[in-house]
């Protein structure tokens, strides 16, 4: 039986739409000009806890961001339900430009870099003077990552009641790095906390250190309203501690406009991602001397112009030694 009449027109024939392309596609994405500003406090399995004004809001990354991931410290734009009520979820539609980035790789042979913290002003490298023993190679690697990422370093030496700090401070004295020395008794009495706070007020500070050095204990003393688990112990055989912090977390510093970011304990700090040429920027007294260096100079080779620059009295030889020690840290393992 004929479905249509004898004189049919193409416009009269019904066509079934395909399963795909049922609506026109466009590359134009919404600008979300009315999106609210927020700060990422922590990330847990695809869910991001953000601070929007004075509310804590749970959010997820919008599909339009692709593989770009937000990390603790990121300033983001959010839309959707921003009430902060239970079982509500907002969307992160934009990640603002970062002022600094702390990156690391699993090891020096791993090309995959992981952003640990964004927009921090300084990196507090927490090191115990004993139990466990200091690991200068790991400190050097953290310093390289700080300089490469645009963060100012700060040394926080703990457990001075078990060993004196003189030897370690002498090793880093020519780098002009600010430092604070603490003991267990001073932490309990609160006097050490006051000295550390002087270095943190008005800044966003990321705390790093290998397990067992007392990093989380110090953070708990600085932010008593947010106690994190500190029941880790140091293995008597390996001299290393157990992780007590499993994810980075940004915490407001009480009585100040500063922020503290506690990060998981480190076992290693890969520097595969670091361009050695950026480390020289942390040595402004040496940087002018590199103008005579050959192209792609590693600053640790026979033709390096820094040797003549220092010999002429433009900079302290100890500073050049410190620079080359940090540059060599990228080629050495922490345990070397």
Image (cartoon, helix red, strand yellow):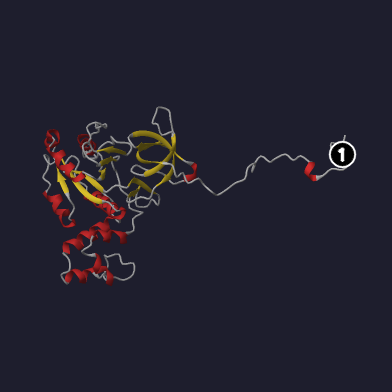
Q: Is residue 78 left or right of residue 315?
A: right
What residue is drawn where x is 18% and y is 39%? 131
Q: Can residue 336 be spotted in the picture?
A: no
Q: Secondary structure at mark 1?
A: loop
Q: Residues within 10 Å of mark 1 (few under 14, many from 20)?
A: few
Residue 224: name its quadrant: top left
Against 67, residue 231 (above or below) is above
Against 89, residue 31 (above or below) is below
Q: Position of residue 38 (x, y in %)?
A: 37, 40
Q: Position of residue 260 (x, y in %)?
A: 26, 40
Query: In this figure, which residue is indicated by the disc labeled 1?
Result: 5
Who is closer to the viewer here, 91 or 310?
91
What residue is drawn where x is 88% and y is 41%? 6
Q: Position of residue 209 (x, y in %)?
A: 25, 43
Who is closer to the viewer here, 73 or 245?
73
Who is closer to the viewer here, 298 or 207?
207
Q: Position of residue 323 (x, y in %)?
A: 23, 60
């Amino acid at each position: 039986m004929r479905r249509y009449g004898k004189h049919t027109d193409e416009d009269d024939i019904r066509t079934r739409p395909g399963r795909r392309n049922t609506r026109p596609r466009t590359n134009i994405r919404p600008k979300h000009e009315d999106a609210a500003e927020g700060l990422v406090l922590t990330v847990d399995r695809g869910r991001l806890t953000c601070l929007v004004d004075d509310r804590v809001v749970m959010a997820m990354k919008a599909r339009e961001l692709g593989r770009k991931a937000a990390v603790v410290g990121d300033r983001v734009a959010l839309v959707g339900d921003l009430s902060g009520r239970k079982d509500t979820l907002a969307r992160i539609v934009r990640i603002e430009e970062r002022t600094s980035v702390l990156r690391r790789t699993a090891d020096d042979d791993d090309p995959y870099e992981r952003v640990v913290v964004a927009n921090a002003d300084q990196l507090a490298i927490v090191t115990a003077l004993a139990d466990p023993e200091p690991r200068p190679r790991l400190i050097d690697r953290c310093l390289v990552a700080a300089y490469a990422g645009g963060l100012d370093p700060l040394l926080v030496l703990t457990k001075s009641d078990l060993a004196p700090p003189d030897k370690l401070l002498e090793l880093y004295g020519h780098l002009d790095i600010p430092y604070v020395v603490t003991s267990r008794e001073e932490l309990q009495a609160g006097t050490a906390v006051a000295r550390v706070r002087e270095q943190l007020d008005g800044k966003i500070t990321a705390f790093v250190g290998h397990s067992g050095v007392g990093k989380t204990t110090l953070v708990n003393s600085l932010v008593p309203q947010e106690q994190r688990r500190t029941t880790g112990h140091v293995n008597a055989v390996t001299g290393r501690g157990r992780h007590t912090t499993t994810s980075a977390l940004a915490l407001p510093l009480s009585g100040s406009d500063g922020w503290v970011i506690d990060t998981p304990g480190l076992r290693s700090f890969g520097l595969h991602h670091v361009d050695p040429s950026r480390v020289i920027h942390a040595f402004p007294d040496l940087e002018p001397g590199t103008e005579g260096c050959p192209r792609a100079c590693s600053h640790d080779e026979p033709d390096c112009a820094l040797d003549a620059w220092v010999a002429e009295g433009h900079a302290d030889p100890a500073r050049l030694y410190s620079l080359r020690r940090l540059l060599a840290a990228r080629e050495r393992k922490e345990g070397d």
